[in-house]
Image (tube, grey):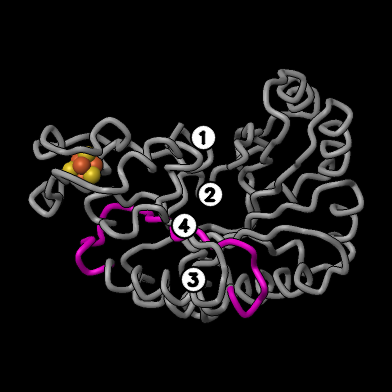
Amino acid sequence: MIRYKEIFLGKHCNNKCLYCSYRLSDSEQPDFNDVTTALEQTGEDSIALYGGEPTLRSDLIRIIDTAHRNGYRRVKIVTNGRALSDNQVLLEIVKAGSYLFEIKLWGSKPDLHDYLTETPNSFLQTIQGLENLQRLPCDKFTCLRIPICKQNFTDIINATITGINLGVNRIILSLEGDNLPLKDLLPHIRVALNISILNRVWILTEGLPFCIMQGLEHHIGEIYYGYDSKIYPRTHRHHKNCQHCTYQEICRGVETEYLNKFGHTEFSPIKENKYFGEIRALNG
Ligand code: SF4
């Protein structure tokens, strides 16, 4: 899978998502020269622009142009999707050469999504942005990120179906926070995965260890792009049972705060697994 160099464009955002570490924080805003310097440090041929909310920057088109002039082939925008509800904004971004989008959806209904973003009408704008993308008569790639938390986990199946109906290319079910017992979540994950597979939409998870995902290991996103994301930082650690587990060398374990709250007894070490060789090879 393509690895993206992550370029930070500032904490400013028009949502106030309950689980966002930048929530209500405006202070850090690299100027155009800072961004240009980051872009000049080459290595990868693909970048992901993230914030905060990248589409709020008035120099976004100039940044995309600069990225292309520095030789990046792919420029992904990690966004809440609200700005894309304005078709003109979407067309300008695509015209500048960015046709990869990762959009966050917290729920399949306005009340749930808007509650978790703490922003009225954010759901309608995000959905409109996804619809505009779907209608765009050119190549594009849309990844729908569905963050999972205690307040929305029973809705992830509906959110997955919403994404499929909106023609997204990939879905990521990403565990946020540390207050949701995984045994409660897993049945919903299984159904969401099956629905997406049946509809031929690629679906991955983040934040769930191999021992929880047995039989579904190849849907663990971290296998393909690793654990080191500045956009979605995690503080995994191994626990007592990991030392007996086949996957210890490629698994980072479980979120530290989750282990502090719920302990490690639900995470049984995997003694043997016929897919381990293939998964280790994918992990690179
Ligand atoms: S027991 Fe530990 S190493 Fe093994 S899959 Fe679970 S969290 Fe990862």
Q: Is residue 122 left or right of residue 236?
A: right
Position of residue 32 relative to residue 217, above or below, is above
Q: Is residue 175 magenta?
A: yes
Q: Is residue 179 magenta?
A: yes
Gap between marks 4 and 3, in whole Å?
A: 10 Å
User: Which residue is rendered at x = 9% and y = 36% of the image?
Assistant: 240
Labels 4 and 2: the sequence-earlier one: 2
User: Which residue is rendered at x = 53% and y = 59% of the image?
Assistant: 145
Q: Which mark is residue 24?
A: 2
Give the magenta range.
164-185
- Mark 1 vs mark 4: give the one in front: 4
Residue 87 picture location, percent across and down: 85, 68
- Front position in the image: 60 or 67: 67
Amino acid, disc 1: Lys
Residue that mark 1 sits on? 230
Question: Which secondary structure lies at badge 3?
Answer: helix
Labels 1 and 4: the sequence-earlier one: 4
Q: Is residue 251 left or right of residue 37?
A: left
